[in-house]
Amino acid sequence: FMETENKKSLGQKIKFGVIASGLVVVGLVAGYVLGVFGYIKVIGPYISEMKYKKFLEDYLKPYKEDFVGGNTPEETIDLFIDALKKGDYELAVQYFEVQEQPRWRESFKNPNKENINEWISEIENAKKIWKKEQISDSNFVFKYNTGIGDKERTNFIYTRRNMNNKWKIEGF
């Protein structure tokens, strides 16, 4: 009789041990999963925010470092014309807003001096007749007409004040 009870008890002990071990394993796995997801839930947004801040910092860096330009829109246009006259196209490009510089840098790689001289002449003549319009505190546009009769067209020079209070050319 005692032997049967010992066998039962041994069988129950083994069964209990297997169940207890299984519960411990399930608990450890659940704890790990919840812990990892909890970690991701807590740390994930912070990592995303850090990536965003890094992206924003990298994006704004050239704008923060851009101190080339005039103190007025007119001064920037004059400095731009002077750079073109000297053939300093890299400096001329720097009078444009940062995001426009790669496009203008590319267009000045193989400059056509005759076209550039015509452009200089057009802008210098435009200064005598243009109408300056304020769009906002940091935006001005200069409007002028070129050509005669049915070949007359209205041209624009757009300018904007950057974060360093320097005036830049947005475009023509």
Image (cartoon, helix red, strand yellow):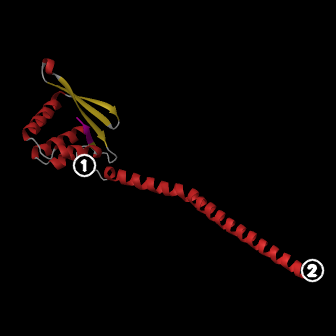
Residue 141 locus on image (x, y percent): 27, 32
Indicate whether 5 appears above or below 126. below
Image: magenta residue range: 168-172
Q: Amino acid at mark 1?
A: Val
Q: Is residue 69 visible?
A: no
Image check: 29 left or right of 146? right
Quadrant showing the C terminus = top left
Q: Does the segment drawn in magenta span residue 108?
A: no
Image check: 39 left or right of 8? left
Indicate whether 110 appears above or below 147. below
Nearest the camera: 80 or 107? 107
Identify the residue at image location x=36%, y=51%. 59
Nearest the camera: 12 or 103? 12
Give the labeled residue for mark 1: 68
Which circle, 2 or 1, is nearer the viewer? 2
Q: Residues within 10 Å of mark 1 (few under 14, many from 20)?
A: many
State the mark number for residue 1: 2
| Magenta part, dominant SS | strand
Residue 21 locus on image (x, y percent): 71, 71
The secondary element bearing badge 2 is classed as: loop
Q: Are the residues at dot 2 and dot 1 in contact (C-beta closer than 8 Å)?
A: no
Residue 76 locus on image (x, y percent): 22, 42
